[in-house]
Image (tube, helix red, strand yellow):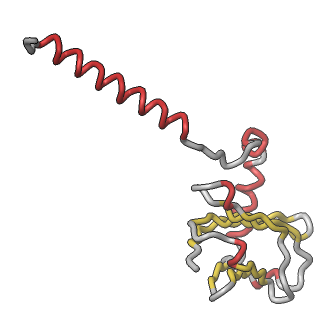
Amino acid sequence: MKWNWGYGLTIVFIAFASNVGFLVYKCTQEKFDLVSADYYNEELKYQDKIDGMQNAKQLSAVQLVQTGDEVSIQLPKELNGHALTGQVWLYCPANAALDYKAPLQVNEDGVMLIDKKKLADAKYTAKITWETGDTKYYNEQSLTIAK
């Protein structure tokens, strides 16, 4: 059998088609998590988030501190003693299964503690919403958990 350009072209075409088929297979196996399954309704409420950020800027900063076994969320000192309701959402962009949501439960000093055992070693975005009276607040900060 004599080797000619037709055999070479056939081999290149088969290799190319095999690579494309492999890439298509790998792409269909990739998992993509949305930030929210109900993103359309969340987008309609985005103005509330903007207003909450403006309200939070008028107060002292929210502080996220990691200690040995806990993550401490310190709300602004101006709100100590006020009745607060809200939610803490530690959003993990890499994997929605690692997200952590909890109702805001602060002590008399305005501190909420979260046990690190409930969290994975990952990068999170802490999305904290709270309200006192009719005023809504929102704060978003980056947080990397390292145990």
Q: Residue furthest front?
A: 1
Q: Find residue 64 and report its horizontal and vertical position in percent.
A: 65, 78
In-image side of 22 versus 94 (left or right): left
Where, quadrant-wise, is the C terminus in this rendering? bottom right
Could you say which quadrant of the image residue 79 lies in? bottom right
Residue placed at 68% from the left, 70% from the top? 57
Residue placed at 81% from the left, 89% from the top? 109
Asked if residue 76 shows in the view, the reply is yes
Where, quadrant-wise, is the N terminus in this rendering? top left
Could you say which quadrant of the image residue 144 lies in? bottom right
Which of the pair 40/46 is nearer the observer? 40
Residue placed at 65% from the left, 45% from the top? 34
Could you say which quadrant of the image residue 5 lies in? top left
The number of numbered discs placed on residues in the rendered structure image is: 0
Q: Find residue 59 and report its horizontal and vertical position in percent.
A: 72, 76
Q: Find residue 104 and report its horizontal and vertical position in percent.
A: 83, 72
In-image side of 104 versus 127 (left or right): right
Residue placed at 80% from the left, 83% from the top? 110
Which of the pair 49/31 is nearer the observer? 31
Does residue 131 sit above or below 68 in this rendering?
above
Q: Find residue 6 and report its horizontal and vertical position in percent.
A: 16, 10
Does residue 105 sit above or below 134 in this rendering?
below
Asked if residue 130 shows in the view, the reply is no
Which of the pair 33/89 is nearer the observer? 33
